[in-house]
Amino acid sequence: MYLAPMAELSHRALRELIEGFGGSAVYYTEMISAGALVCGGPYESWYLDSGPCPERVVYQLVGADPERLAAAAALLDRRECAGIDLNMGCSAPAITRTGAGVRWMSSIERAGELIRLVRRGVKRRLSVKLRIGLEDDMEYLIRFCRRLEEEGVECIALHPRTAREKFKGRSRWDAVALLRAALRVPVVGNGDIADAGELLCRAQGPWDGVMTGRAAVRQPWIFAQARRLPGSEAIRVDLEATGLSFLERLARYQPPEFHLSRSRRFFSYFCDNLIWGNYLKNLLNREGDRAGIERIWRGYFQEHGEERLKTF
């Protein structure tokens, strides 16, 4: 079971929070800009923090320039990690307009040449995370992935939606099964996992791994709970303390410039555990710094102490 790469979320503070509940088998980092890494960008050291378990962390790279992607991958290959992943699935306009993310899926030949170039400088496990493609064409997806496999990719994670669908509709897990049957390398499925029960159910499917993102932010205990199902005792969680623990780790491991955006992103999901979560999200989004978010968070439980301890 894998933690998916998520912008502003898949960093050390979240990993430590999840580890405190029992941990995930593999953690993907946020997207790391290949160009910024090669050029020594001011924030790259924060993105490269692979703690607390570097041996289970996969660095994910994003970029449009093959030479820079290869150079960045070679730099990451020198660090302790579980592997290096190339993002060929992000459909955000800011990424695709540069030719990065899912735009790599527009050409089998160009993507294959990229993998060949990157593979020369990488000894660790090389993987790719992608979507069904720019269009809904399974035959093309299989040919695309077979080329990646031929050039040295050792694992593929599929978010089974097209670029146009983004997060709309339901993930098509039948596409994950079809891709797994067509390839020799492991295939990991990703998408629409709501809770630990669904995570466990998906983990028993005809693929090699299951990846979840937003559900693990909402409930950082989801991996531990899935491993204990079925018929196990429920998990008792102190929600106030968990939120404060995240904020403390955020201050410890991220630069001040990141505190506000990452706090808001985390609580936009974590507040779903509370009865008045939407109201609380609105209050938190009005705050201008991490200290204000902490004050509002504490204040909520002073008024709604009955919500502090919950069983999941």
Image: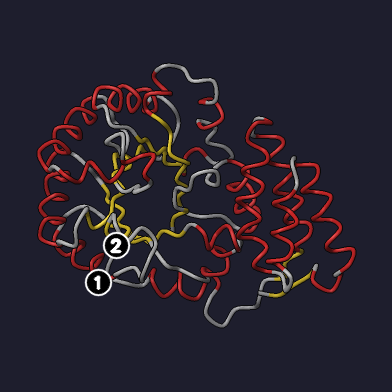
Residue 28: image x %, image y %? Answer: 44, 45
- Which residue is outermost to the right? 302
State whether residue 80 is above or below residue 171. Answer: above
> Viewer-nearest of labels 1 and 2?
2
- The spot of residue 111 in percent (x, y) is 17, 38
Tag shown at residue 245? none
Give the quarter of the image for residue 141. Answer: bottom left
- Callout 2, which amino acid? Pro
Q: Are marks 1 and 2 in contact (CB under 8 Å)?
A: yes
- Report the residue that reaches farthest toward the top: 39
Disc 2 is placed on an element classified as: strand
Q: Could you tell me the amino acid type at mark 1?
A: Asp
Name the residue at 29% across, 70% down: 172
Q: CA distance from mark 1 to mark 2?
A: 9 Å
Residue 74 on image: x %, y %: 32, 24
Q: Is residue 46 left or right of residue 166?
A: right
Looking at the image, tell me whether mark 1 or mark 2 is earlier in sequence order: 2
**Quadrant of the image occupied by residue 64:** top left
Q: Is residue 107 left or right of residue 17?
A: left
Instruction: Tell me: 272 left or right of 291.
Output: left
